[in-house]
Amino acid sequence: MQIPHQGSCLCGAVTYRVSGALKAVTHCHCRKCQKGHGAAFASYASTPRANLHVSDAGTALKSYESSPGVLRQFCCHCGSSLFWQNVRGEYSEWISIAIATLDTPFTAPKQKHHCVAMKASWHAITDHYPQLP
């Protein structure tokens, strides 16, 4: 039996639970992920949207459409980037979760780097995971 993953934003106003597996672990180096996370890249794992259960009693979870059909969600109190979803794409029923916001242990043996053509010039990728343009 799989134990659900749990996570939260920095201030705790938004908490969530994932009732299914987390898959497709990606480290995205695109400029939008860099700006959205204030870091060299953002690390996400994906799950069907129906598996994500969000608790947000104070309506702290806000959305921003960073590209047509691409919604990024974050806490309006602390600014934590939590989720993103392409509502128009092939995987519109899936949502990606910023894995650094997980509060439960998570192991991801299969990972990849995405958008490495846009990677920060000051960051060197030193692991052995596949790199996609």
Image (cartoon, rainbow, N blue to C red):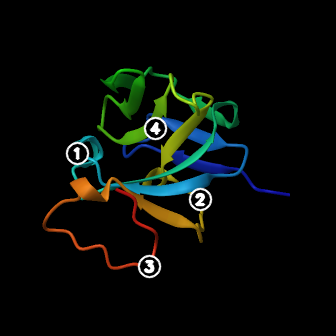
> First in sequence: mark 2 or mark 3?
2
Lower position in the chain sequence, tag 4 or tag 2: 4
Dot 3: what SS? Answer: loop
Residue position marked by numbered label 1 in the rendering:
31
Cα gap from disc 3 to disc 1, whole angstroms: 22 Å
Q: Is residue 36 above or below residue 86?
A: below
In the rendered image, which quarter is residue 52 located in? top right
- Residue 60 visible somewhere in the drawing: no
Q: Given the image, on which type of amino acid does mark 2 rest?
A: Thr
Q: Quadrant of the C terminus?
A: bottom left
Q: Secondary structure at mark 2?
A: loop
Q: Which residue is mark 4?
A: 83
Q: CA distance from mark 4 to mark 2?
A: 17 Å
Whichever of labels 1 and 2 marks the residue nearer the N terminus, that label is 1
Q: Is residue 64 visible?
A: yes
Residue 49: where, in percent of width, then height? 63, 32
Residue located at (40% from left, 27% from top): 70
Q: Residues within 10 Å of mark 3 (few under 14, many from 20)?
A: few
Quick one: SS at disc 4? Answer: strand
Q: Marks 2 and 3, how far apart in space?
A: 25 Å
* Residue on which disc 3 sits: 128
CA neighbours of label 1 inside 10 A, class few (<14), some (14 to 19), many (20+)? some
Q: Nearer the viewer, mark 2 or mark 3?
A: 3
Q: Position of residue 104 (x, y in %)?
A: 59, 59
The residue indicated by pointer 2 is 104
Q: Nearer the viewer, mark 4 or mark 2?
A: 4
Q: Amino acid at mark 1?
A: Arg
Amino acid on which disc 4 is placed: Phe
Q: Residue at x 14, y 64 (%)?
A: 121
- Viewer-closest of 36 and 7: 36
Residues at marks 4 and 3 touching, judged by CB atoms closer than 8 Å: no
Judged left or right of residue 86, residue 52 is: right
